[in-house]
Amino acid sequence: MSDPSPVDPQQAEFIARVRRLMLLTVGGTFLAVAVVVMLIGYRLFRSGESAVSHATATAPTAPVTATLPTGAKVLSSAVGDGHIVLTVEVNGAIELRSFDLKTLKPLGRLKLAPK
């Protein structure tokens, strides 16, 4: 193909400006894609690490005993978010007792009474 007619300086400046803008746009797109891929990789790496560390960290290394009042009867238990909650019947009254999952230290007690 033959070379088209020469481009005047104003058109050449416009074409150079469009090329710079295209390079900026392409560079920004590649940067955004790289950030998203790195973020996904980081999240995957961290979630796998936390699952392994969580499984080993929640098991107590030495035997620990959580004490309840004499005659208390455990009705139910629930575990979540680093806590264990026991529903306990003490002398006919129902209480919710919360303990730290790792140390089994008491965190709180809630008595449930009829109105």
Image: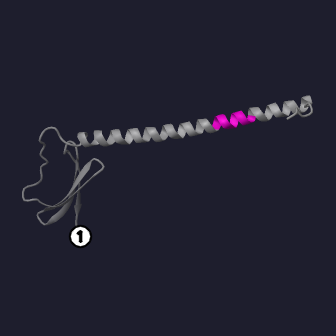
Q: Nearer the viewer, residue 111 or 105?
A: 105
Number of callouts in the render? 1
The structure residue drawn at horizontal position 12% and vertical position 53%, both measured from the top left corner, is 68
For the stretch drawn in magenta, what is the main secondary structure?
Answer: helix
Quarter-of-image position of residue 105: top left
Query: Would residue 28 appear left or right of 108 to someone viewing this image?
Result: right
Query: Would residue 27 appear left or right of 87 to someone viewing this image?
Result: right
The N terminus, quarter of image: top right
In magenta, the rendered stretch is 21-28
Local secondary structure at mark 1: loop
The structure residue drawn at horizontal position 10% and vertical position 54%, both measured from the top left corner, is 69
Q: Residue furthest left?
A: 70
Query: Would residue 44 appear left or right of 98 to someone viewing this image?
Result: right
Q: Residues within 10 Å of mark 1 (few under 14, many from 20)?
A: few
Query: Would residue 8 appear left or right of 53 to someone viewing this image?
Result: right
Position of 51 relative to 90 (above/below): above
Which residue is denoted by mark 1 in the rendering?
114
Instruction: Tell me residue 8's x, y (percent).
Output: 92, 30
Quarter-of-image position of residue 31: top right
The structure residue drawn at horizontal position 22% and vertical position 66%, both measured from the top left corner, is 113
